[in-house]
Amino acid sequence: MSKPVLVGDVGGTKIRLALASSSLGHVQLHNIKVYDDPTIPSFEDAIEDYLSSSDVKPKSALFALAGPIADDGSIKLTNRPWPRVVPSVIQSRFLIDSATIVNDFAAMARAIPEIPNDSFETVIESHFSPEGPILVTGPGTGHGVSTLIQSVTGGWRVMTGEGGHSAFAPRNMREAAIRDVIARTYNYVSVEMIVSGRWLMPVYEAICELEGVTPEDLSPQNILDRADAGDKVCVEVCKFRANALMGAVGDAALITGAHAGVVLTGGVAERMVKWLRTTEASDRFLERGPMSPFLAHTPVSVLMHDEAPLIGAAALALE
């Protein structure tokens, strides 16, 4: 068994930390601890709490955080109001020889080969091709995009970007009207602003305005429950977001050449499976004019695994 490595995943609502090791080529996680306290003042405070309760003192660490990585390896998170997280500061404070920060969707993508098949829910069934890139994307608090490619030597390479901030492209007049209502306040309307968790209320409020309905203070679960009960506005919210997500995913699959499949991740995608499986949403992914045959055999699934980013961080750290 390899020496333990400290790994972490920071989402918009939870922080997960664990010790990772490798045995016979398989990633193993130990002592997983989840923090869901939004008042934690910094990432370093969470690390300090975790290490103070552990007898193991790791000498290396790898953390998956949301946002672009700076030239010095540091990151300013896009989903938390924390100070910049700097690897050298972590190394000095916790006497760690090596600390690395990666984009959270790099870890998410790298987890895919390590996770059993029964953790994936099928959205569009097709023939899986082991050849070609796998697009890993999805809405949580934000909206991440990455591409997983198998190398000729059998390993894996991850390419990341900030595709969630690409512009939302309406496909009909109603979607354009919703976009225009949101744009009055925010000007630029990205895919993330349509499909992610933290932007749910602006979408709901825009549809309420177009319907002449006074918006209520609803939770995401309230909206899902009302949609299931047939509430007109909430049904449109769910359909609109599912269609927009599948349209954006289809665009990204064309750009990346994702012949080996698309994996949707994140808490929002997990809760949207019913809506993603509709014919209308599937058509948004598949209908590409003369390039429709390009995606005709591309499977789409939703990953249902809370610890996926930790597993991916461990796989990256132990490579």
Image (cartoon, rainbow, N blue to C red):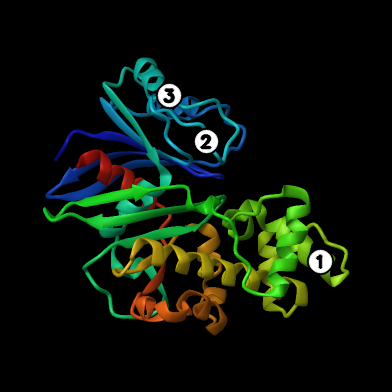
Q: Are marks 3 and 1 in contact (CB under 8 Å)?
A: no
Can residue 303 be seen by looking at this rendering?
no
Sequence-first tag of 1 and 2: 2
Within 10 Å of the Cα at label 3, are there few (<14), some (14-19), or many (20+) other Cα atoms? some
Q: Measured from the top left, where is residue 203 in percent x and y?
A: 71, 61
Q: Which residue is mark 2?
A: 77
Q: Amino acid at mark 2?
A: Leu
| Residue type highlighted by circle 3 | Val
Residue at 56 percent of width and 29 percent of height: 82
Q: Earlier in the sequence, mark 3 or mark 1?
A: 3
Query: Can residue 49 be seen in this snapshot?
Result: yes
Calculate the distance from the C-alpha at mark 3 to the C-alpha at mark 1: 43 Å
In the picture as drawn, the residue positioned furthest to the front comes out as 290
Residue 30 screen position, x and y as percent: 30, 42
User: Which residue does the numbered mark 1 point to in the structure image?
Assistant: 208
Identity of the residue drawn at 29% across and 45% down: 29
Image quarter where the N terminus lies is: top left
Which picture quadrant has residue 83?
top right
Q: Residues within 10 Å of mark 1 (few under 14, many from 20)?
A: many
Q: Is residue 228 above or below residue 192?
A: below
Residue most extreme to the bottom:
279
Q: For the residue marked with disc 1, what is the amino acid?
A: Cys
Relative placement, left or right, of 189 versus 133 is: right
